[in-house]
Image: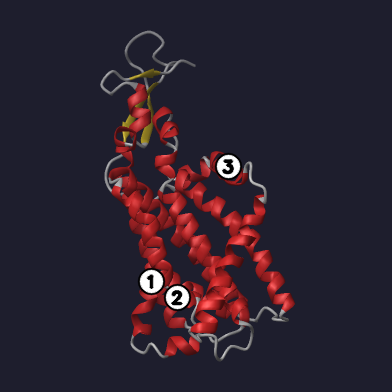
Amino acid sequence: MNTTLSSNIPPVSDALVTTPLTITPAPNTSGAGADKEPVTVIEPRRGWRLMDFSAVWKARELLFILMWRDIKVRYKQTLLGVGWAFIQPLATVAVFAVFMGRFAGVNEGLSYPYGLFVLAGIIPWLFVSASTTSAGNSLFANERLITKVYFPRQIIPLASVGSALFDFIVALFLLLVGMIWFRVAPALSTPVAILSLGMLIILAAGFGTFLSALIVKHRDFRYILAFAVQLWMFSTPAIYMPAQKLAELGQANWWLPLNPAHGLILNFRAGLFGDELNWYALGVSSAVTLLLFVIGTTYFRRVERSFADVI
């Protein structure tokens, strides 16, 4: 069946490239064959909107293709391949164990080795940092794809988060081996750890989506991002500081959960190892996470109509 575009809209290529679309079939009343040939009107959607989950679901096959592409590109022509998913957390744990555990003495009061403690914090942190960094740069890295064809733009940063999640799952096997080696069994509060992990994924998706749109509009943030992520790690003491040392921070414990990574990582490890859960930190960090997701995805939908023009 032939489809004719109305004459009062821009050329098809411009419309497809620059905006999310509303496609409305309408009857053709222009002459013969009016009953057989509908007119399709393509119009931009305007205003503030949340993420279009239905559009993402319809494009899920493309989402998985982009995820798999990112994973293959990351490990293509490397000597160790997926082994880098083990080396990075192990190297980071070694640095923290020497400088924070031995020199700074923050490893006191733990019922299991400090290295295992840091490993359970650094693995989710590496997921958050890698996913937000790659998602933030994802639109810029896929410039040619964005300017050639229309598809739901949200799946590009989401694919970056998904590929980082693959590394996280691989690194979890390293954590499992450490728990078996030191005879630390998963606790009954493990569902809280799973909840915290789910919120970390939402945090990475929302914040990464926001950064991706921001970097397209303002390239300066592309250079600030790597430095800011390093500062973010050291401002998340739950990664390397046990609860006994956190208690010494006093009033700081009331505002530290405003950093969502702090409260979520703190309760991820506590739920996994059976330590005392911090419900205040979990609640505040979860609320901030959901707020960042709403703000990030809404801002993305607001500015995505101009991506092809400014990228």
Mark 2: which secondary structure? helix
Question: Which label sits in the foreground, 1 or 3?
Answer: 3
Residue 291 position (above or below residue 144) = below
Please give the residue where the numbered disc 3 appears in the rendered image. Answer: 73
Q: Nearer the viewer, residue 30 or 145?
A: 145
Q: Is residue 49 visible?
A: no
Label 1–label 2 contact, CB within 8 A:
yes
Label 1–label 3 contact, CB within 8 A:
no
Disc 3 crowd rating (10 Å Cα; few below 14, some 14-19, many 20+) is few
- The disc placed on residue 74 is none
Location of the C terminus by quadrant is: top left
Q: Quadrant of residue 31?
A: top left
Which x, y percent locates residue 140? Answer: 39, 41
The Cα atoms of the two marked residues, 1 and 2, are separated by 7 Å
In the rendered structure, the answer to whether residue 291 lies left or right of residue 76 reads left
Q: Amino acid at mark 2?
A: Gly
Q: Of label 1 and label 3, which has the lower sequence position?
A: 3
Query: Residue shown at 60%/56% (left/top)?
Result: 167
Please give the residue where the numbered disc 1 appears in the rendered image. Answer: 259
Disc 2 crowd rating (10 Å Cα; few below 14, some 14-19, many 20+) is many
Q: Amino acid at mark 1?
A: Asn
Query: Residue shown at 56%/50% (left/top)?
Result: 163
Please give the residue where the numbered disc 2 appears in the rendered image. Answer: 263
Query: Residue shown at 34%/33% (left/top)?
Result: 308
Residue 237 position (above or below residue 128) = below
Q: Amino acid at mark 3?
A: Val
Mark 3: which secondary structure? helix
Question: Which label sits in the foreground, 3 or 2?
Answer: 3
